[in-house]
Image: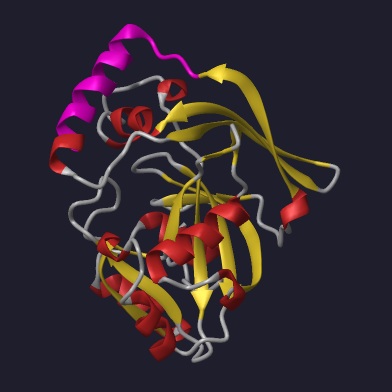
């Protein structure tokens, strides 16, 4: 499925054992001209953002289904590579294979009050700055291997909302998406929590990464389209909501 803003693929209800990350040995290398772009942009971004760091992440090289599993071929890159290609130079890099395409995940969280948790991202962040978005992050390394999207989402929910894993239920991957403005591939996830809006908001006040959002809000599924029309909403967030049939696509 494709819109003007994003594309959806591999729509299903994937469980942890259904997703396999196969890693290509070695770290991705880029031509000298691309490496120069990357270093130049990182010098600027890291100077302006005190929270950013050049962590290990993973380029998505290919994805396919085989024997009822979602197989993702990945290779180590760095967040600096991603910023310097997908975020800062995507329009000038004509060969799309030279983009870092760091694999990420984002999650639709439905509260006990039947609301979706969304946050307004800080203007200091490198991606989707000052946009409304669901909770998410970029896959990082764990014991020299890529963490799973399920591990990532548990971590991100705890960091950004202060919500322990025990309050996250029915976590599943409902597909993959890619926003065209930065070509970043993401696992689209969904879960429920037994916590009310008020309880989630209270936990958020003490979240370790509270600085990533200016504020959070709780939106009824029926009001998502109107909210997205009235506010800047991240395309990949809309992709996840469309995959869950919450955001109604008006154009194809």
In the shown orientation, is residue 81 left or right of residue 1?
left
From the viewer's side, name the closer residue of 248 and 22.
Answer: 22
Q: Which residue is at 19% across, 45% downward?
A: 50
Q: Is residue 238 visible?
A: no
Residue 180 lies, with reference to residue 5, above or below; the image says above
The secondary structure making up most of the magenta span is helix
Image coordinates of residue 27 in percent, x first then y, are 51, 19
Q: Which residue is at 45% across, 78% downward?
A: 116
In the shown orientation, is residue 44 left or right of residue 25?
left
Residue most extreme to the right = 67
Q: Which residue is at 32% across, 22% downward?
A: 93
The image's colouring method is secondary structure
From the viewer's side, name the closer residue of 154 and 226.
Answer: 154
**Number of marks in the image?**
0
Residue 105 lies, with reference to residue 181, above or below; the image says below
Q: Is residue 213 visible?
A: yes
Image coordinates of residue 212 in percent, x first then y, are 28, 60
The magenta stretch spans residue 136 = no
The magenta stretch spans residue 38 = yes
The magenta segment: 28-45
Residue most extreme to the top = 32
Q: Quadrant of residue 169?
A: bottom right
Residue 202 lies, with reference to residue 57, above or below; the image says below
From the viewer's side, name the closer residue of 248 and 56.
Answer: 56
């Amino acid at each position: 499925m494709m819109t003007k803003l994003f594309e959806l693929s591999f729509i299903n209800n994937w469980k942890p054992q259904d997703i396999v990350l196969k890693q290509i040995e070695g770290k991705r290398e880029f031509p000298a001209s691309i490496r120069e772009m990357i270093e130049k942009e990182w010098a600027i971004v890291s100077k302006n953002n005190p929270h950013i760091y050049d962590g290990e992440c993973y380029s998505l090289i290919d994805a396919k289904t085989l024997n009822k599993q979602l197989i993702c071929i990945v290779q180590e890159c760095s967040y600096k590579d991603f910023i310097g290609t997908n975020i800062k130079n995507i329009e000038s890099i004509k060969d799309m294979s030279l983009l870092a395409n760091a694999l990420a995940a984002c999650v639709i969280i439905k509260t006990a009050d039947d609301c979706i948790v969304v946050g307004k991202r800080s203007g200091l962040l490198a991606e989707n700055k000052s946009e409304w978005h669901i909770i998410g992050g970029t896959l990082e390394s764990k014991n020299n291997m890529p963490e799973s999207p399920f591990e990532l989402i548990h971590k991100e929910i705890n960091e950004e909302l202060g919500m322990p894993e025990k309050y996250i239920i029915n976590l599943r991957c409902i597909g993959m998406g890619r926003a065209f403005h930065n070509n970043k591939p993401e696992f689209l996830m969904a879960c429920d929590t037994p916590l009310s809006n008020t309880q989630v908001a209270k936990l958020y006040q003490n979240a370790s990464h509270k600085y990533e959002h200016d504020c959070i809000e709780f939106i009824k599924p029926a009001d998502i389209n109107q909210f997205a029309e009235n506010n800047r909403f991240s395309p990949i967030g809309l992709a996840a909501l469309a995959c869950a049939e919450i955001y109604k696509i008006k154009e194809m």
